[in-house]
Image (tube, grey):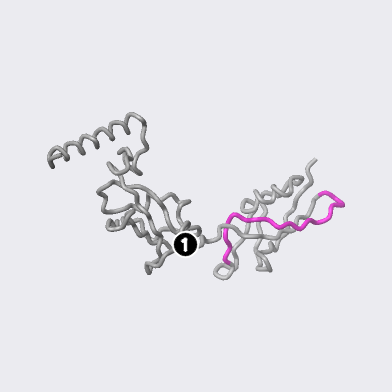
């Protein structure tokens, strides 16, 4: 077979493969509308997760992500990696594209990752004393969660109000009718904060 006829044959075969892929609903290459036809439109890519110094992260299972890319791709976009495919507890260092090493089989792309940064707390634990307007009912000491973070070191006069603890209080004390105007200063105690002012409540019914 001459070089010209061979090229024509390969070109025709590629076109035919694309046509079949389109008709049969073949899966698409990630982030494209191009049918994923191995050897024709796509090649395998092995993503290796590395740290800032280029050292491997994870093992042969958790430190690798297998995918496909365009056959002539020179770069790989790390944003295409599903979050659950990253090593557990890690996140991308950068969303910039990385080079594809084409000399290896399969091709390789090294994606830098780092340990996830801990998110700042958004809630605080508060201990509150409930005093009942109903006669003969003993005080009740409850531990509730306030939907805010207190910082008495920088603001010693910071206060907690009913709205801050409403959801947590009513979830565990369904039999009370609280004073919705209540608010209190706080003091630091083991395990959280203590409201210095008791909350007046009534039993339902």
Residue 8 location, x and y as percent? 16, 37
Magenta-drawn segment:
134-151
Camera-side residue: 58 or 159? 58
**Image label count:** 1
Residue 181 location, x and y as percent? 66, 51
Residue 190 vertical position relative to residue 161 in the rendered view, above or below: below
**Can residue 99 be seen from the camera position used here?**
no
Instruction: Give the residue drawn at x 74%, y 49%.
Output: 173
Residue 83 location, x and y as percent? 45, 51
Residue 31 vertical position relative to residue 90 in the rendered view, above or below: above
Relative side of 29 to 196, left or right: left
What secondary structure is the stretch in magenta mostly built from?
A: loop
On the rendered image, what quadrant is the C terminus found in? top right
Residue 2 location, x and y as percent? 12, 40
Instruction: Give the residue drawn at x 33%, y 52%.
Output: 77
Camera-side residue: 173 or 138? 173
State which quadrant residue 32 falls in. top left
For mark 1, give the secondary structure: loop
Residue 64 within the segment the image draws in magenta: no
Relative side of 127 to 52, left or right: right
State which quadrant residue 23 falls in. top left
Camera-side residue: 109 or 113? 109
Relative side of 197 to 67, left or right: right
Q: Which residue is mark 1?
A: 58
On the rendered image, what quadrant is the N terminus found in? top left
Residue 143 within the segment the image draws in magenta: yes
Instruction: Give the residue drawn at x 72%, y 55%.
Output: 199
**Can residue 134 be seen from the camera position used here?**
yes
């Amino acid at each position: 077979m001459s070089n010209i006829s061979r090229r024509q044959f390969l070109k025709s075969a590629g076109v035919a493969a694309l046509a079949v892929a389109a008709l049969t609903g073949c899966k698409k290459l990630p982030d494209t509308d191009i049918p994923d036809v191995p050897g024709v439109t796509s090649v395998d890519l092995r993503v290796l997760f590395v740290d800032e110094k280029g050292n491997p992260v994870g093992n042969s299972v958790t430190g690798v992500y297998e995918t496909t890319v365009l056959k002539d791709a020179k770069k790989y976009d790390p944003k295409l990696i599903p979050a659950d495919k990253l090593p557990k507890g890690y996140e991308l260092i950068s969303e910039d594209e990385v080079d594809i090493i084409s000399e290896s089989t399969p091709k390789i792309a090294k994606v830098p990752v780092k340990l996830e940064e801990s998110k700042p707390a958004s809630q605080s634990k508060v201990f509150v004393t409930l005093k009942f307007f109903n006669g003969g009912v003993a005080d009740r000491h409850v531990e509730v969660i306030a939907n805010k973070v207190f910082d008495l070191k920088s603001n010693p006069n910071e206060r907690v109000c009913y709205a801050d603890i409403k959801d947590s209080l009513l979830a565990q004390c369904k039999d009370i009718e609280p004073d919705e105007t209540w608010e209190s200063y706080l003091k630091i105690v083991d395990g959280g904060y203590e409201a210095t002012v008791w909350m007046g409540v009534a039993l339902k019914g």
